């Protein structure tokens, strides 16, 4: 559970390598990448490496979770700014993608692109809603913590 002070917020999780039950790390090809992540009071999260790195493609991997964290943080920042700015949203979805590439001999994220699709209530200010994406990007804690570009290509629709 997160703990807070006025200037810091702490988050905890417990990670267990459940793949150990299938055998030790005797070779790179043979060991299981299965993991269990637990956060107090929440459902457990099954994880593994991405299939490209010999993991289980049926469960979450850290690369997907990083892209999801950026998408979720942008959404929550945007929703807060819209509410504070009096812009009535009636829907929001995103199709985020991230590119992992070999950079300077090491795999790193090159960029993440968020593609938020936002639905406004009739009469809402479309230009103001579009402009809020840049502010949401600046206020997103996760985006301001990574060392690669996080781009956004918003689509604004009116219901």
Image: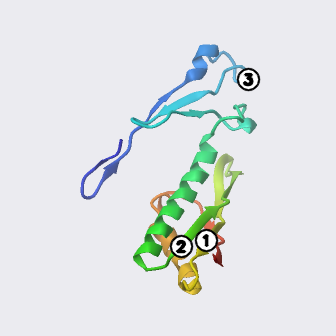
- Determine the CA span between mark 3 and mark 1: 44 Å
Residue identified by numbered label 1: 118
Query: Marks 1 and 2: CB-CB under 8 Å?
Result: yes
Q: Is residue 150 visible?
A: no
- Up the image or down, 49 lies above or below 111; here it is above
Q: Earlier in the sequence, mark 3 or mark 1?
A: 3
Q: Is residue 73 visible?
A: yes
Q: Earlier in the sequence, mark 1 or mark 2?
A: 2
Residue at 59 percent of width and 60 percent of height = 148
Q: Earlier in the sequence, mark 2 or mark 3?
A: 3
Task: Look at discs 2 and 3 and give the one toward the viewer.
Answer: 2
Q: Does residue 153 appear to the left or right of 129 in the view shown?
A: right
Helix, strand or loop at label 2? It is strand
Q: Does residue 138 appear to the left or right of 153 in the view shown?
A: left
- Determine the CA span between mark 1 and mark 2: 7 Å
- Up the image or down, 56 lies above or below 84; here it is above
Helix, strand or loop at label 3? It is loop
Q: Residues within 10 Å of mark 2 (few under 14, many from 20)?
A: some
- Determine the CA span between mark 2 and mark 3: 49 Å
Residue identified by numbered label 3: 29
Q: Residues within 10 Å of mark 1 (few under 14, many from 20)?
A: many
Residue 47 in which image quadrant: top right
Residue at 66 percent of width and 59 percent of height = 96
Q: Does residue 109 appear to the left or right of 5 in the view shown?
A: right
Question: What is the total number of numbered labels drawn onto the structure image?
Answer: 3
Residue identified by numbered label 2: 89
């Amino acid at each position: 559970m997160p703990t807070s002070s006025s200037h810091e917020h702490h988050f905890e999780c417990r990670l267990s390598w459940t793949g150990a039950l299938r055998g030790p790390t005797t070779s790179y090809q043979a060991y299981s990448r299965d993991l269990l992540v637990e956060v107090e009071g929440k459902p457990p999260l099954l994880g593994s490496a991405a299939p490209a790195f010999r993991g289980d493609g049926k469960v979450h991997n850290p690369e997907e979770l990083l892209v999801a964290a950026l998408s979720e943080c942008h959404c929550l920042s945007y929703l807060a700014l819209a509410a504070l700015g009096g812009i009535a949203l009636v829907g929001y979805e995103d199709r985020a993608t991230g590119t992992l590439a070999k950079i300077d001999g090491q795999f790193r994220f090159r960029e993440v692109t968020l593609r938020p699709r936002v639905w406004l209530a009739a009469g809402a200010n479309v230009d103001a809603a579009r402009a809020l994406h840049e502010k949401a990007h600046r206020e997103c804690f996760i985006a301001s913590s990574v060392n690669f570009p996080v781009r956004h290509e918003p689509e604004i629709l009116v219901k």
